[in-house]
C-alpha cells in the first residue's frame, strides 16, 4: 500500500532509522570500535531520531484517543528506545549486546509504525485532517543528512 503523501516525510525518516540498525549490525560484524558505534548512535539520535519521535508525538499521536493501543505502544516504544540510548551514553563500558538491543528496538519499532500505526492513521483520519498533519510536518520537518565522518559500517573503515 502506498503511504499517504502527508505521512511520507516521516516514512522517509524511517529509512534512516532502518539504516541506523543496519549500520550498528555491520559495525559489530566488522569489529568496529564500539565507542565509534556508540558515538554514531548519539549523533544520529540528536540529529534525527529524537526529533522524529517528537514530531510524531506532536503531529500524529495527538490525533489519536488517549486509550488508543497503537498510540500507547508508540509512546512506550519511544520511551524504551530513548532509555536504551541514554543507558548507552551513561555506560562505563560499551557492551555489544546493548548496541544490538538498540538496533533491534529501532527496527522493530519502525516496522510497527509502517505496518500498523500509519495504516491505522490513514484509515481513521479523513483527507482534511491528514492534509493538516502534512502541512504541520512540512512547516518544521528537517530531513536527515548524513555527515558522520567515520563510516565504521564499511568493511575496511577501521
Image (cartoon, helix red, strand yellow):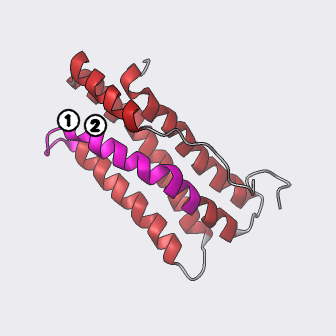
Query: In the picture provided, is 79 more to the left or to the right than 14?
Result: left
89 falls in the magenta region: no
From the top left corner, tell me how far across and down residue 143 is, in percent. Answer: 52, 38
**Up-down: is 44 above or below 99?**
above
Q: Which residue is mark 2?
A: 60
Is residue 70 visible in the rendered image? The answer is no
Residue reaching furthest to the bottom:
92
Identified at 49% across, 39% down, the residue is: 14
**Up-down: is 148 above or below 4?**
below
Q: Which residue is mark 1?
A: 63
The chief SS type of the magenta part is: helix
Looking at the rendered image, the quarter that the N terminus falls into is top left
From the top left corner, tell me how far across and down residue 36 is, in percent. Answer: 69, 66
Query: In the picture provided, is 75 more to the left or to the right than 62?
Result: right
Determine the CA span between mark 2 and mark 1: 6 Å
45 falls in the magenta region: yes
**Up-down: is 115 above or below 3?**
below
Residue range in magenta is: 42-70
Amino acid at each position: 500500500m502506498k503511504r499517504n503523501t502527508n505521512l511520507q516525510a516521516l516514512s522517509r525518516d524511517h529509512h534512516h532509522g532502518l539504516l541506523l540498525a543496519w549500520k550498528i549490525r555491520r559495525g559489530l560484524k566488522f569489529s568496529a570500535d564500539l565507542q565509534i558505534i556508540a558515538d554514531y548512535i548519539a549523533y544520529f539520535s540528536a540529529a534525527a531520531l529524537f526529533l522524529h519521535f517528537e514530531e510524531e508525538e506532536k503531529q500524529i499521536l495527538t490525533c489519536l484517543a488517549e486509550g488508543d493501543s497503537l498510540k500507547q505502544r508508540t509512546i512506550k516504544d519511544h520511551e524504551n528506545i530513548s532509555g536504551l540510548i541514554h543507558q548507552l551514553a551513561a555506560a562505563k563500558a560499551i557492551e555489544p549486546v546493548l548496541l544490538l538491543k538498540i538496533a533491534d528496538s529501532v527496527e522493530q519499532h519502525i516496522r510497527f509504525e509502517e505496518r500498523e500505526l500509519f495504516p491505522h492513521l490513514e484509515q481513521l483520519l479523513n483527507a482534511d485532517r491528514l492534509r493538516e498533519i502534512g502541512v504541520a510536518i512540512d512547516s518544521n520537518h528537517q530531513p536527515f543528512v548524513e555527515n558522520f565522518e567515520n563510516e565504521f559500517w564499511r568493511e575496511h573503515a577501521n
